[in-house]
Amino acid sequence: MLLTWDDRSCNVGGDGLEGCVQNGPRTMDYSVVMNFDSAFRGKRVLVTGHTGFKGSWLTSWLLLMGAEVCGVALDPPTEPSMFAILGLEKRCRHHVLDIRNSSGLSKIVSDFAPDYLFHLAAQAIVSRSYADPVDTISTNVVGTANVLEALRPLTKRCVAVMITSDKCYENVEWVWGYRESDALGGKDIYSASKAAAEAVIHAYHHSYFSDAEGPIRLARARAGNVIGGGDWAADRIVADCMRAWNRNDTVAIRCPRATRPWQHVLEPLGGYLALAVALSKRPELQGEAFNFGPLAEQNRTVNELLTTISSQWGFISPDQAFRVVEDRPFSESHLLKLNCDKARHMLGWHAKWDYSDCVRELVAWYKAFYQGDQDMVEITRAQINAYCA
């Protein structure tokens, strides 16, 4: 996608973008612009769910660009946690709060008065949604409503990107990717909670935020099956492997033929950032939804993913790394992928790393961590810089 753009030569380093020099307009491929200029430098950015896997990566990226970050979340959900490893509690305004606490959340939003808000906080584990469906629904639906309600009194411009999941689509397991206009729904509690959250966001947009010239600019983002260093969540296949392989154990897997659009965590986060910047400049994006996922040819089965990762980890044979078990405690979809043409054509965004890049960076991060003598802040920065390059 060719646009007229101001030529800036930006080198990412330290905690921000250094050496940005504007040399005048030229025609360039917008899809390669991943440094977001200085859009976030000095801006106040509120991130819900900043203690989680995706939230820690997003917080790290925002800090690298010079943003002032305020985070609202529960305590880190795992031990170890990327949030603690990177010392993010001391590098941002850290608030431990359940997003179902509407009054507490509203006060934080009002006091901080963000320029940007990224809503990631959620109950995101499918197995847990089966064990505690009411908690999942209340967190994902009521919590989302509370974030939107906290935005309503703001009088200054705030760009809000509300993140749900690719699971919000009514999955009929067809072979083509779901578009943003396809039906929402879900046969399981987690999927239904994400579809319901989408309905709440849609209703708030039309009821309170439909005026794109008003203080709140709002859009929705959908992605899923992200992998990368720093994830230790329960019942996530990569996290399960890292824990087990560090102990020299094998991993039991349930659905080896399940196909997913695996992507590195930086891919959708780059999409969220690109959406926020575009939304701040283009009122016609108000209320729109966008998918962020890899190209279709990057879809892999669970078996293919683990075979690749285990080989790079150092296993001679996949049989040493994982085994298939037949017992399935809950139902899981076998095929799910997204159509991301809208993000490509309207935002100039597309996935930058191919499948091999994704797996290489994932394995490199975990190996560096388990070596025990690496500076994981620098490792994380280096991967963000490599992605931006």
Image (cartoon, rainbow, N blue to C red):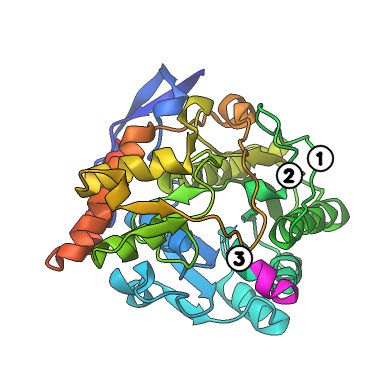
- Residue extending furthest toward the right: 207
The disc labelled 1 sits on which kind of residue? Ala
Q: Position of residue 389 (x, y in %)?
A: 29, 35
Image quarter of residue 311: top left
Label 2: which residue?
Answer: 169
Query: Of label 3 and label 2, which has the lower sequence position?
Result: 3
Look at the numbered disc 2 and give the secondary structure of its residue. Answer: loop
Q: Which residues are magenta?
A: 129-135
Judge whether residue 245 is colored magenta: no
Query: Marks 3 and 2: which is nearer the front?
Result: 3
The disc labelled 3 sits on which kind of residue? Ser
Residue positioned 29% across, 64% down in the render: 249
The numbered dot on residue 16 is none
Label 1: which residue?
Answer: 183
Q: Residues within 10 Å of mark 1 (few under 14, many from 20)?
A: few
Look at the numbered disc 3 and give the secondary structure of its residue. Answer: helix
Q: CA distance from mark 1 to mark 2?
A: 6 Å
The disc labelled 2 sits on which kind of residue? Tyr
Vertical comparison of 385 with 389: above or below: below
Total labels: the figure holds 3
Q: Residues within 10 Å of mark 2 (few under 14, many from 20)?
A: many
Q: Residues within 10 Å of mark 3 (few under 14, many from 20)?
A: some
Q: Nearer the viewer, residue 176 or 273?
A: 176
Judge whether residue 130 is colored magenta: yes
Label 3: which residue?
Answer: 127
Query: Of label 1 and label 2, which has the lower sequence position?
Result: 2
Pointer 3 with pointer 2, Cβ within 8 A: no
Residue positioned 40% across, 66% down in the render: 232
Vertical comparison of 346 with 102: above or below: above
Query: Marks 3 and 1: which is nearer the front?
Result: 3
- Residue extending furthest toward the left: 373
